[in-house]
Amino acid sequence: MDSRDALRRFWGYDTFRPRQEEIISSLTAGRDVAAVLPTGGGKSLCYQLAAVLHGGTAVVVSPLIALMDDQVRQLAEMGIPAAVLNSTLNYGEQYIIQKRAIEGAYRLLYLSPERLVRDDTLAWLLQVKVAFFVIDEAHCISEWGHDFRPEYRQLLSIRGKFPNTPIAAFTASATKRVRRDILDQLGLRDPDRYILSFFRPNLRYHARQCKDAREQQRLLTRAFQQYQGESVIVYAPTIREVEDTADRLGNRGIDAVPYHGQMDAAVRKRNQDRWMSDEVRVLVGTIAFGLGINKPGVRAVIHLSLPKSLEQYYQESGRAGRDGEPADCVLLWRRKDIGLQAYFINEISGEEERKRSWWRLKVMRQFAEGEGCRPRLICTHFGEEPRWAQCGQCDNCGNDLAWFAERAAPAPVVTPQEIDAELLEWLRAWRRKRAYEQAVAAYVVLPDVTLRALATRAPREISELWGISGLGTKRIERYGNEILEAVRQYQAGARVAAPSGPKESPRDHVKRLLAEGKTFEDISRIRQRTLAATIDLVSAMIEDGDIEFQESWIPSSRAPAIREVAEHYGLDRLKTIKEMLPAEVTYEDIRLVVAALKAQAR
């Protein structure tokens, strides 16, 4: 079986993406490899297919447990034996995997960097027929990388223990300096180097400086008129802004779930799973979200603040359009973002790291404020010299977003006429059910591009499934009859059921809970929000006249004092008001009373 036969049989694709076939040839020939492929460039397929052809076991080092789990499940769907070895498994499960690996049962074996460099792990691997090592997210090894991880520095021990085993380093975002670090720190020997263009022609980059949060939220509301029914990621800078944004979108009838590090782990996972399964289309998260997320059909990534580096922004925005279809990368930033980052940079104790941080901020500002082609700036930052001056796709090259315009009323994204939109939703519902049964992400069952092709062809026979992108032999064997049955049901009149009754908005939910006598702490717990976010929403409801301020919500002695100070110094000067009051008076107390005063003034 050659590489193209394997591509068709297991992945269901007819052609490789740029340089994939050459990288696979280098790996199967036993060469060290250093590959920089942009996000969405298909780096996972390179080492996965090479492992299938080699016959031994490829050991993949990744810092992301979620990504490792997803890839192992996806490989299982395609009929490729793989396993992950990490601390989530009990001793018995780990022992079985290690024993089967020695027996040659797996084509791929995934480990964390911390696990790999343990003496007992290295001793066990010496008994495994290791085809080659893969260091994924290799930029983590460099202090000049945007995601430096000290544990990656220990990976040089692989070369000492396995002197004759090839090592392949893969990354999506590495400058020239970081690439040099990768080669040195891993001890790569005359590696075959593959550096693809950082230009992704399906991504449309747009940046806009906003006056305040209200302008950002106004633009977001317009955006979701454009992206109706599509998967979107919104990055907010703080936990409070994550929760506030999710609530504001909910109040406008846009289903959105929050994601941040202070949430209960089970709630956070449930929110991620709901988004991954397309049950909810919008996820609002801090930068804690996205590590290891490989959902192909994201149509937009919107940032509500200036990222710390262009590498970080390139990686996060690059989560859009991994299926190769057009997608938008939008940066809505404010002047205060610069001041806030400058403050934190000055707090860094190490001089070298402080210098690196200032440099990263400078580059990020050039991207956000500059008038040149934005993808071209990305390319030159990573050491590429494009032969073109304009991409024709970003805002600086004349491609404006309709929802950026004042008083814009943009139409929703238009589904091409040949795609049956209702059949597409029916197939998505089938996929969601299948993914839930198997406890995997929806795209692991079938990617969006495959569903769109099915909704275009409406196949009636198994023979019509061959040649559809993403449907390899194993998937057709597993899902072929189910897909045909789903199409038959649709053609017989079956449709996705419309939601029964109006959905309760966040404001209505809070109003009902208050009427039931719930405290703010109760409401925060029920809605999985921070107390500060709950108070913000209640305060906004007071200002808008949705509810009336209740004196019982704060200690009785505080309200008169807050009113007096607020009326003297001004209702928008919360910090000054706080400084003029006793220490026990909280910002939450002040926010509620000030909201009542603003409501009275209207």
Image (cartoon, rainbow, N blue to C red):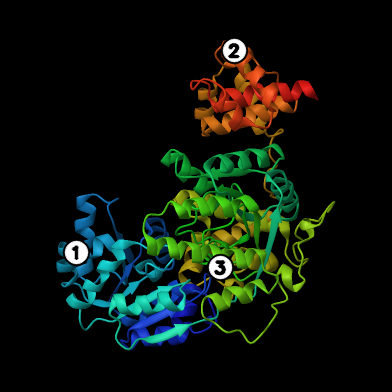
Mark 3 / mark 2, whichever is N-terminal: 3
Which picture quadrant has residue 549? top right
What numbered label is drawn on residue 121? Answer: 1
Position of the N terminus, as image quadrant, is bottom left
Q: Position of residue 207 (x, y in %)?
A: 68, 62
Residue 189 vs residue 55, the one in the foreground: 189
Q: Position of residue 172 (x, y in %)?
A: 47, 71
Q: Is residue 566 above or below residue 284?
A: above
Q: Is residue 397 above or below residue 217?
A: below
Q: Position of residue 12 (x, y in %)?
A: 52, 74
Tell me if residue 288 can be seen: no
Asked whether disc 3 touches disc 1, contact meaning CB atoms under 8 Å apart, the reply is no
Name the residue: 30% across, 75% down.
185
Q: Would you name the residue on which mark 3 appears?
A: 363
Which picture quadrant has residue 241? top right
Q: CA distance from mark 3 to mark 1?
A: 41 Å
Mark 3 / mark 1, whichever is N-terminal: 1
Give the residue type at disc 1. Answer: Thr
Give the residue type at disc 3. Answer: Val
* Residue at the outermost top position: 556
Q: Would you name the residue on which mark 2 appears?
A: 552
Q: Is residue 557 left or right of residue 564?
A: left
Give the residue type at disc 2. Answer: Ser
Q: CA distance from mark 1 to mark 2?
A: 60 Å
User: At numbered mark 3, what does the secondary structure look like: helix, strand or loop?
Assistant: helix
Name the residue: 20% across, 72% down.
128
Name the residue: 69% across, 77% down.
391
Tell me if residue 501 can be seen: yes
Which picture quadrant has residue 450? bottom right
Residue 380 vs residue 226, the one in the foreground: 380
User: At numbered mark 1, what does the secondary structure look like: helix, strand or loop?
Assistant: helix
